[in-house]
Image: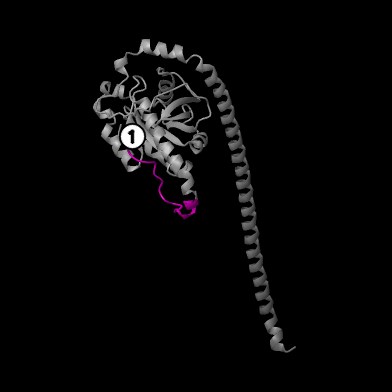
Amino acid sequence: MSVQENAQLPSTLLEAQTSISTQHSELDKVKNYLADERAQHERETNQLKRMVIKDEIYGSQIQILEDRNQQRYNSNESLRPTLASEAKRKIPLNDVVPARRMKPIRQGKQDSIESNTWDDAVPIYNFVLVGDAATGKSSFLLRLVYNQFRDDIGMDFHMKKMLVDGQKTNLRIWDTAGQERFQSISRLYIQKAQGILLLYDVTSEQSFLNIRAWLEQIRDSAEENVPVCIIGNKVDLREHEAARRCVSMADGETLATRNGALFCETSAKEGTNVVEAVLHLAREVRKNVKLVKPKMSLVKLAAKNAKKTFGTFCRL
């Protein structure tokens, strides 16, 4: 080996050591990256397991509630004549009429609010009541089922028999009162719903502003084109509140029109338009259910990010 080659050996060795150090550094980075990815994967796996467990728990709880309330429904059927007679004594007939400036649904000759002359072998549609707390969801449901008013209740769900366009129909209506803060529970209710009653309080502007957030949650959780009826409840309190604090009918109609939803103003306390709103939504659900099967083959052609709509706007 020449003297010149011997002189170059230290610099060559230094370069080799530098290259090895660089490669070790890169290898350490890769190891750290893999360790982070493994830890992230474990966290996501554990989170997914917890979500699955929660969904199973919520699903079992919903099934238990359905079974328990079905038994309650069967036992309460025998009490309906008594409750109806008590309601007639407490509520004057002229109080259960559509409010002024409202256009009630026109019922055909074959339409009826309720009938007890058929068995349970009829279509069952799942409805859900959603909206901010204290908007009157439970009182709305109690008025619909028993034609009574109370403001200190928290019903789980109930059944309602109706004639919809002459067809015998059972409505299973879920009430999410008290669960507004638990988004995962509300989402499970919404996923099962074929029709959604979205309530706000006409005397609470904040509950009206939150309707948009509820619509977004419905779009994310419910089936596409699920019929929604936006309902401004507690109209009986509007005349007692300052006008600037109340949500006008025009504002509610505008919001419903922009989102392709039905619209109605009701009073669970006075019974105004409660049955009419549910009957009209039931009609839209029947139409929607009939259109599901023909459209199944076209689902894959729809844009994934297309904005969902909720049916045809209608003012009551």
Q: Which residues are magenta?
A: 297-313
Q: Quadrant of residue 225?
A: top left
Neighbours of disc 1 within 10 Å: few (<14), some (14-19), many (20+): many
Q: Main secondary structure of the magenta part?
A: loop
The reply, left or right, for residue 304 in relation to residue 57 is left
The reply, left or right, for residue 66 in relation to residue 259 is right
At a point 32% along the width and 43% down the height, the residue shown is 258
According to the image, label 1 marks what residue? 263
Residue 29 location, x and y as percent? Answer: 62, 61
Name the foreground residue: 310 vs 296: 296
- Is 216 one of the magenta-colored residues? no
Question: Can residue 93 be spotted in the picture?
Answer: yes
Q: Outermost residue, right direction?
A: 1
Colour scheme in use: one colour
Q: Quadrant of the N terminus?
A: bottom right
Residue 7 location, x and y as percent? Answer: 69, 84
- Is 307 one of the magenta-colored residues? yes
Name the foreground residue: 216 vs 297: 297
At a point 59% along the width and 27% down the height, the residue shown is 64
Q: Is residue 303 above or below residue 214?
A: below
Q: Is residue 182 above or below residue 18?
A: above
Q: Outermost residue, bottom direction?
A: 2
The reply, left or right, for residue 266 in relation to residue 58 is left
Residue 50 location, x and y as percent? Answer: 61, 40
What is the secondary structure assignment of the residue under circle 1? Answer: strand
